[in-house]
Image (cartoon, rainbow, N blue to C red):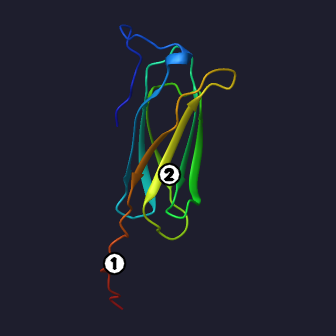
Amino acid sequence: MEFFFPEDNLTRAVPEETKIAALSAQPYPDGRRLRVNLEVTPFQKRPYIEVSLHNADGDEVASTNIVEPMSWKLEFTMHLRGELKNPYTLNARLYYPDGPSDEPRQFSFDVEPPPPSTETDSN
């Protein structure tokens, strides 16, 4: 596990220039969870971030709100609800409640179904 501590030599962006720099997702092998990686430009004022996950039908299957993150490099897990319907689209939006917002970002991907269980009953 990596921790990201502020570095004194970083230039921090004002709210108007704070943006989502990277968004990606990797499904776990179980086909029910998703590791999300989100990177924001270093900021002076902590933003708010909304993240939602939609299936191929456009239905929201997971969402989260991040309020004033301490770091600009975030990693978290989202849980998929319902049956698998590829492709999935991850949407992220950075904003300030009383100020500017960044253009929403999207990341699309497929989730592989988990492999069939090979366990046998030994009774």
What is the total number of numbered labels drawn onto the structure image? 2
The residue pinned by badge 1 equals: 116
Name the image quarter holding residue 81.
bottom right
Where is residue 114? Give x, y as percent: 36, 70
Q: Label 2 sits on what residue type?
A: Met
Where is residue 106? Give x, y as percent: 46, 44
Pointer 2 local density, CA inside 10 Å: few below 14, some 14–19, many at least 20: some
Secondary element type, mark 2:
strand
Out of 110 and 39, give the one closest to the viewer: 110
Q: CA distance from mark 2 to mark 1?
A: 22 Å
The residue that appears at 55% across and 36% down in the rendered structure is: 93
Where is residue 94? Give x, y as percent: 55, 31
Residue ranking furthest to the top: 9
Apparent side of residue 100 relative to residue 113 in the rendered image (left or right): right
The residue that appears at 52% across and 52% down in the rendered structure is: 53
Apparent side of residue 101 relative to residue 71 in the rendered image (left or right): right
